[in-house]
Amino acid sequence: MRVGVFDSGLGGLTTWLACTRYLPTAEYFFFADTAHAPYGDRTAEEVCQYTRAAYAHFLELGVDALVIACNTATSAAVLPLRQQARMPVIGIEPAIKVALQESEGEILLLATELTVRGSKLAQLLRDRDGGGRVRALACPGWMEIIEEQAPDWRVRAQAYWCEHIEPALGAAQALVLGCTHYCWLREEISAWSGGMAVYDGNDGVARQLYRLLLQREPDSISTARAPLSLHFTATAAAARKQAAAAELLRNAGVELRLLPLSSA
């Protein structure tokens, strides 16, 4: 069983990790469109174009399902892509429903500019947040700090938090991470916010992927634990991005075997 995971950069690796908890023996292909990152300040049309190119890449690899591990790409491109796709396409979206169910009071959603101004988030809020408890905050530049992986990236990420996000917390009682890059800072964000509950959409994507593949290929599903491996490719600075991916995962307690990209 082959699964494609797509993001503009390294944030989608947090989604991939969630998927491996349900489907550890699947063969995973990760595609980071680093040549065009960040997506958050692109137009919706540009993001649709890049997402279609990624889909064509995975189509050639013969994957059984595609996970769009990028909130911005999901917001801009998942609906038109599904109209043409020959495989299940699972997009990630902010875990607003869970946050509303499990927390009280105001909820602050942190996301990229394109996600915040996109029609998909507006519809999601209309469908899920009848009480108007969720407030969205665009965080331009924060994803780039995380993606760059400079030696002091965590220090710079905290400085960004203190300058741009902490003053906007207001009466918020919980936080939703609307960009998978932010998930690399989940524990820090909880600490910086004074212990607020922090939610993201990764587990929901992983469970949806498991359900879809279980319906389509029940005999190929195995939850037996196995050493994690990943076919990794990036559209720019591939060697540096691969090294950064391995380091991020190592710091998360995951020793990863990175594999060369192969065709179906």
Image: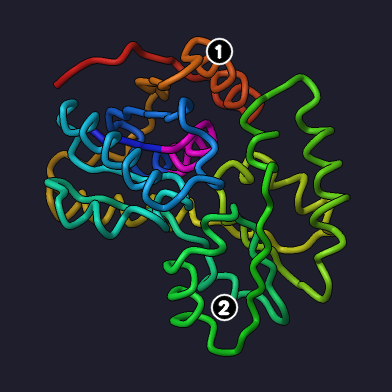
In the displayed structure image, the side of residue 196 where residue 135 appears, left or right = left
- Could you tell me how many numbered marks the image carries? 2
Disc 1 element: helix
Q: Is residue 171 above or below residue 17?
A: below
Q: Is residue 20 above or below residue 212?
A: above
Disc on res. 230: none
Residue 217 shown in magenta = no
Examine the image and state in which quarter residue 100 appears: bottom right
Residue at the image point whose x is 50% and y is 10% from the top: 239
Residue at the image point whose x is 19% and y is 26% from the top: 61
Residue 15 shown in magenta = yes
Residue at the image point whose x is 42% and y is 67% from the top: 120
Residue 94: x and y, percent? Answer: 52, 61
Give the position of the N terminus as an image quadrant.
top left
Q: Which residues are magenta?
A: 7-18
Disc on res. 240: 1
Residue 108: x and y, percent? Answer: 69, 68
Q: Residues within 10 Å of mark 2 (few under 14, many from 20)?
A: few
Query: Looking at numbered disc 1 in the image, what kind of residue is underneath it?
Result: Arg
Query: Looking at numbered disc 2 in the image, what kind of residue is underneath it?
Result: Gln
Disc on res. 101: 2
